[in-house]
Image (cartoon, rainbow, N blue to C red):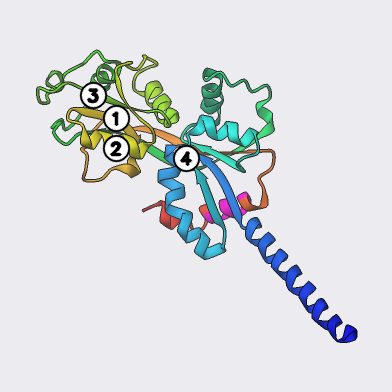
Amino acid sequence: MKSNSRPYFRALAICVSLIVCVASAALADEVKVGAGAAPTENVFNKIKEPMEKAVGLKLVLVSNGPVEALKELDQGKVEAATGGLTFQDWMALMEKEGYKISDTGIYKYRVIGKDIIKVITHKDVAVKSLSKEQLKGIFSGNIANWKDVGGPDLPVVVVWGAKIPGTQNVFQKQIMDGEAYTKTVKEAETAADVKDKVSATPGAVGLGPASIIDSSISTPEIPEVGRPITLITKGAPSPAVVKMLEFISGEGQKYIAK
């Protein structure tokens, strides 16, 4: 009985080892990324499923905005942080938010895409185009009614996304020339939440990446506001991040372009 049991236990040990190896491989084929609105909407939501099917790499996306993404990168909670702004502007944003970075040289960064920021309005705001000066007036609070820019007699309601600071900083820099945003806003979270609240609120206006545009809102013509989509790692990228970057720069382009 004792001698007959040895092959059984050897086989059992092999099965356990195989299960452990498979579980480890499954964990290794996962990449966790912190993201702002621009990379979430323009890159990761588009490549997530195709990448998993093509190369077996599962993407775990934490869409908390670029500030939280970098903090979580520093804490080791994510393998990469991504945002819709340049590396230099990102570092300045962290400083502005009170997050001191003593040595920016610890980070490696690369541009993985680009984004165009759009102004979105409720469909009852029948304004076909807005100039830079009009946009400054609307988002600073100096223009409080749409009739002042050729629209209906409706109060302007600025919808503010708490988790899209990269979008707001770029718009503030390129359109508002650094002028402060109005403090009288309707609160929202992500870019998708901004769109939902704009579509549901008469007179509402907000900001978001071009990829969120659909028939539920209107998009007046504005001067072009563009920005790079930047990915940051702490030190050299992990093998999983490298695998993801290879997919993004290769096969992933056909999905990102849509």
Contact check, label 2 and label 1, Cβ < 8 Å: yes
Q: Amino acid at mark 2?
A: Lys
Q: Are there few (<14), some (14-19), or many (20+) residues within 10 Å of tag 1?
A: many
Circle 4 is placed at which residue position? 63
Q: Which range of residues does the magenta coloring cover?
A: 241-247
Q: CA distance from mark 2 to mark 1?
A: 7 Å
- Percent from the top left, x then y, of residue 38? 42, 39
Q: Residue tagged by mark 2?
A: 195
Residue lying farthest to the left in this orientation: 153
User: Please, is residue 248 above or below residue 115 in the view?
Assistant: below
Q: Amino acid at mark 1?
A: Gly
Q: Quadrant of residue 109?
A: top right
Reading the image, the residue beneath label 1 is 206
Q: Residues within 10 Å of mark 3 (few under 14, many from 20)?
A: many
Is 242 magenta? The answer is yes
Residue 170, quarter of the rendered image: top left
